[in-house]
């Protein structure tokens, strides 16, 4: 039987550009092909600076991790692996759980207790992962899971697994395919630092293939109290409301540094207040709902344009790494309470009229 799909996932779309054995069967959930949405409320018309959001929250499990997980799980399955493991601030665990379910492989996820958002936890549980929590943070969890492949028959699917980056680099291919060129600047959140490394790999490969001429300046955006790249060294106790990027010891340190240096880009950071303001701006003025960690890219752009660090006539892409529904608690805590009226509807008319005054 032929299964018809309009979008067969990132392996089908870009197989010839992925370093994977040719006979690997794709374990996929139609990830990728996410929208690149113009953001008029963030763009600057006078200076002709156009800003687009690469909406990675529209992947099957609601984050960019799916691009990497389809490749990691396809390879794990191809190699006969019976179990996969990851440390996670939430999204990796959700994605690993879903793709493992699809592959018929058991997922083990190690998370910092109480520090991952409820939506992500629900996903990992629902997809049948064994959820293991520790009293420490993501970096502690990472140290634990890295040891496991030596101690048990389990495949590590964090982004230190090179197949993850193979999948994630397809986001850069898509940006170019959608825009028709590379952007001038690419802002994205940085936590464990795999994604910025993967994007840069994608842009470089499209450059080497002659598909793009100029490549973007990569701007790695961190949360102020979880910003090891700004400090220049790992930090012990990272803290931020953007729990997805609450990471002090990024595993892809060298690759991410290289991406920023080679692209003539830079790292920068925003405090939690600016992150939440950017999240709200996107939701209220652009109709786009992303999770706090994703908004750090918009917060970063808004700050850099204000400082005059973005050239006129530029095209900017900000990656929104995860969907806002991942973290409803943060969203609700930032918003006014619902207004209660009697069940007959009394008072609604006056409310509407007074709001429109
Ligand atoms: N944005 C979101 C929503 C994330 O979940 C992550 C990482 C990042 C940005 C940073 O990407 O690690 O490649 O630099 N989340 C991981 C996780 C760590 O476990 O879900 P990175």
Image: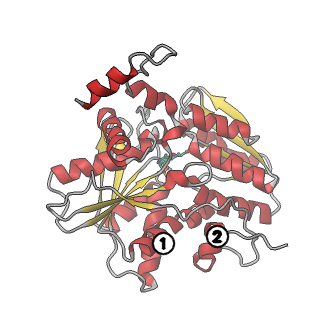
Residue at the (35%, 54%) spot, across then down? 220
- Distance from mark 1 CB to nearest ligand 1 atom below 8 Å: no
Name the one closer to the observer, 95 or 268: 95
Q: Quadrant of residue 293?
A: top left
Residue 178 sits above or below residue 101 on the image:
below
Classify residue 240 as left or right of residue 80: left
Classify residue 9 as left or right of residue 264: right
Name the one closer to the observer, 277 or 248: 277
- Cα distance, mark 2 to mark 1? 18 Å
Q: Quadrant of residue 216?
A: bottom left
Mark 2 burial class by Cα count in 10 Å: few <14, some 14-19, many 20+: few
Residue at the (65%, 73%) spot, across then down? 12
Q: How many marks?
A: 2
Q: Position of residue 261 (x, y in %)?
A: 32, 64
Element at label 1: helix
Q: Position of residue 154 (x, y in %)?
A: 76, 50
- Distance from mark 2 CB to nearest ligand 1 atom below 8 Å: no
Q: Mark on residue 346? A: none
Classify residue 356 as left or right of residue 335: left
Element at label 2: loop
Q: Mark on residue 173? A: 1
Classify residue 153 as left or right of residue 167: right
- Say whether residue 161 is visible: no
Residue at which label 2 appears: 6
Residue at the (42%, 32%) spot, across then down? 241
Q: Position of residue 135 (x, y in %)?
A: 59, 26
Mark 1 burial class by Cα count in 10 Å: few <14, some 14-19, many 20+: many
- Say whether residue 273 is visible: yes
Residue at the (50%, 47%) spot, across then down? 322
């Amino acid at each position: 039987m032929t299964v018809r799909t309009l979008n067969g996932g990132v392996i089908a779309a870009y197989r010839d550009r992925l370093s994977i054995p040719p006979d690997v069967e794709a374990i996929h959930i139609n990830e990728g092909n996410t929208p690149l949405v113009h953001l008029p409320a963030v763009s600057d018309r006078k200076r002709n600076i156009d800003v687009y959001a690469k909406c990675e929250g529209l992947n099957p499990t609601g984050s960019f991790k799916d691009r990497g997980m389809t490749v990691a799980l396809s390879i794990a399955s191809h190699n006969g692996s019976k179990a996969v493991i990851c440390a996670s601030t939430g999204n990796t665990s959700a994605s690993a759980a879903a793709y493992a379910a699809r592959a018929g492989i058991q997922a083990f996820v190690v998370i910092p207790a109480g520090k991952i958002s409820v939506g992500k936890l629900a996903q990992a549980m629902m997809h049948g992962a064994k959820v293991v929590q520790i009293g420490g943070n993501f970096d502690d969890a990472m140290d634990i899971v890295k040891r496991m492949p030596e101690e048990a028959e389990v495949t590590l699917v964090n982004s230190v697994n090179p197949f993850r980056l193979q999948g994630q680099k397809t986001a850069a291919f898509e940006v170019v395919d959608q825009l028709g060129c590379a952007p001038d600047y690419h802002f994205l959140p940085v936590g464990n630092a795999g994604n910025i490394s993967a994007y840069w790999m994608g842009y470089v490969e499209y450059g080497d293939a002659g598909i793009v001429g100029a490549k973007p300046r990569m701007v790695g955006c961190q949360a102020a109290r979880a910003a090891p790249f700004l400090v220049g060294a790992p930090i012990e106790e990272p803290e931020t409301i953007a729990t997805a990027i609450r990471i002090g010891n990024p595993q892809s340190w060298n690759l991410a540094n290289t991406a920023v240096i080679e692209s003539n880009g830079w790292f920068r950071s925003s405090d939690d207040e600016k992150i939440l303001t950017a999240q709200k701006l996107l939701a209220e003025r652009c109709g786009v709902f992303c999770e706090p960690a994703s908004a750090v890219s918009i917060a970063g752009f808004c700050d850099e344009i204000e400082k005059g660090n973005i050239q006129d006539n530029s095209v900017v892409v900000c990656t929104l790494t995860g969907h806002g529904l991942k973290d409803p608690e943060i969203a609700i805590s930032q918003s006014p309470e619902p207004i209660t009226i009697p069940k007959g509807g009394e008072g609604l008319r006056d409310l509407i009229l007074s709001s429109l005054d």
